[in-house]
Image (cartoon, rainbow, N blue to C red):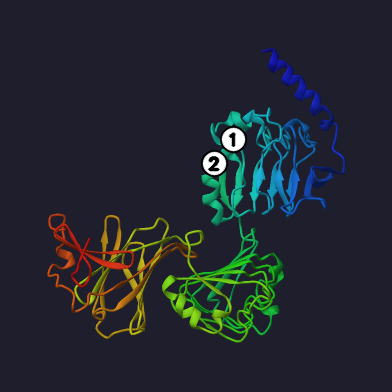
Amino acid sequence: MKKIVLSLFFVVSIMTPAMAGLASSGKTGTCDWTFDSTTGLLTISSSSDAPDWGGELKLSNPFFSPFAANDDIKEVMIEEGVSEIGTGAFMSCKNLKKITFSSTVAVIGFSDDESADDVLVQLPFYECTGLETLIFKSKYAPDTDNRIFDRKTEDLYAFDPSKVNLFINDESVRSFLESGWGVFHICSLPPMAEGKFGDQNQISWKLSANGKLTVMGQGAMPDFASAAEQPWISYANQITELVVAEGVTHIGDMAFGLNINIESAYLPVTLESIGKYAFSLTNKLKEIICASVVVPKLEENALPTITDETRYIYVWSYMKSGFEANENWSKHKIVEFGAAYEILTFTDVDVEAYGENTIYIKWPEVAGATTYVISIISEDGSMAYDVYVNKDGKVTSYVKKATRPTVQYKLEESIDGFGLEVNGLGIGQKYNITVIAKDEVQILATYSTSTYTVSQVTTPITEPRTEVTEENSAKVRKLLRDGQIIILRENKTYNVLGKELK
């Protein structure tokens, strides 16, 4: 009991000066701050002596915050450039209603004081009983002491966090939920700006507060005579990430020229061409994920090379040679997709070849997907198909890019996903297969592989796939292993030429 009394005395004695009033400006750690007593707005910015990663509002002890227990603070605005907010920074500011965290805030609520291990004071807004709104512009949930979320009770905050609206970008929801922030009421942050353009307003766009520009629609983007015609030109310096959604087939002339702060871009499966000067002077654009299943045509200076630096173009493994053979694309570094890129989930789709001219493609059902796009392309270019399947497993449409006249397909639903049977293919030919699961805006998961149809010299297999049941599957089955078709027959393994594999 004695320890508790001493602690309470310490808290009161430390907080009393703050309650007397806050100065109009000051410095804490490597952060500058200003306070407008008329509006109650506290603004925190990065100081000139801040490290490269940003200003740090560090507090050796949560009770040393110059803002703690100040009833005059009503709103806090944390500006771009601030990377860390110390533990207990705004604790007991009972009239504080709103805090806006910039996209650069990466750490919240840690202390340099090893003895300050009480979880009740780790959160920077503990006992902010008037708190109504938290706004996070970051793409990922900031790092924080995970003990904060262990109990998930009102006592932990001295208020009910489920009644506090936490606004984040839609693409950040998963990160915040996995980090424990779901104890608050998660809300979608409205876009910073949005609109439509094109002859029939067929293309729409929105800019998230974290600098992500998403361009959506069906068909070709219009060409712009200059950057001034770009609908988002007023926000050009705030755009750091670009996503061109599935359905867009052409990126217009000068579409993103002078958007000088774009660092990464995603180009869709449906893309066929990029117009003149589309990415002119985007020298920070060092990473492009191009999911197109054809090599998009590049017009004059569509994608200028960065001087003395490398721009990486990530493509499907089976498309790499095509990009490298193109004199315009090959000016950049062509790299196969890797699992490190969270915008796509890369997995081998289950492909089974049976008969001389038939393949069966199977993929899992993906939560949230509204459309599946299955691309089947023969290596010799004689056949290219895109089949569109809805969330219920129904074929809604298909696009013939090049095809053998006898190609047919049928789709069937299974317990753990969907399957597409394609027949009428060339005998013994190689086919590249991509399955893309997406919602209305972006890709959720992607599966890809390649396979050969069975050659005429292959040891014949009389049982069709539909007859391979649990009872006889041990006798004959074909599967794809490390890019090769393997035949399982009576507990022995053969290649497509009938040679037994040891």
Q: In the rendering, at what x and y percent does residue 386 appear? A: 37, 75
The C terminus: image quadrant: bottom left
Count of labels in the image:
2
Quarter where residue 151 is shown? top right
Quarter where residue 66 is shown? top right
Identify residue for label 2. Answer: 180
The residue type indicated by label 1 comes to Ile
Residue found at x 26% / y 81%: 426
Q: In the rendering, at what x and y percent does residue 157 appear? A: 62, 32
Q: Residue furthest top?
A: 2
On the rendered structure, is 271 left or right of 373?
right
On the rendered structure, is 99 left or right of 388?
right
Mark found first going from the N terminus, 1 or 2: 1
Work out whether 314 lies above or below 43: below
Q: In the rendering, at what x and y percent does residue 234 appear? A: 71, 70
Q: CA distance from mark 1 to mark 2?
A: 8 Å
Q: In the rendering, at what x and y percent does residue 196 appear? A: 58, 73
On the rendered structure, is 243 left or right of 369?
right
Question: Which of the two residues, 335 or 90, is positioned nearer the viewer here?
Answer: 335
Work out whether 420 lies above or below 402: above
The N terminus: image quadrant: top right
Marks 1 and 2 close (CB-CB < 8 Å): yes
Q: Is residue 272 visible?
A: no
Q: Residue furthest front?
A: 502
Identify residue for label 1. Answer: 148
Callout 1 secondary element: helix
Question: Which of the two residues, 287 or 134, is positioned nearer the viewer here?
Answer: 287
User: Are there few (<14), some (14-19), or many (20+) residues within 10 Å of tag 1?
Assistant: many
Quarter where residue 240 is shown? bottom right
Callout 2 secondary element: loop
User: Are there few (<14), some (14-19), or many (20+) residues within 10 Å of tag 2?
Assistant: some
The residue type indicated by label 2 comes to Gly
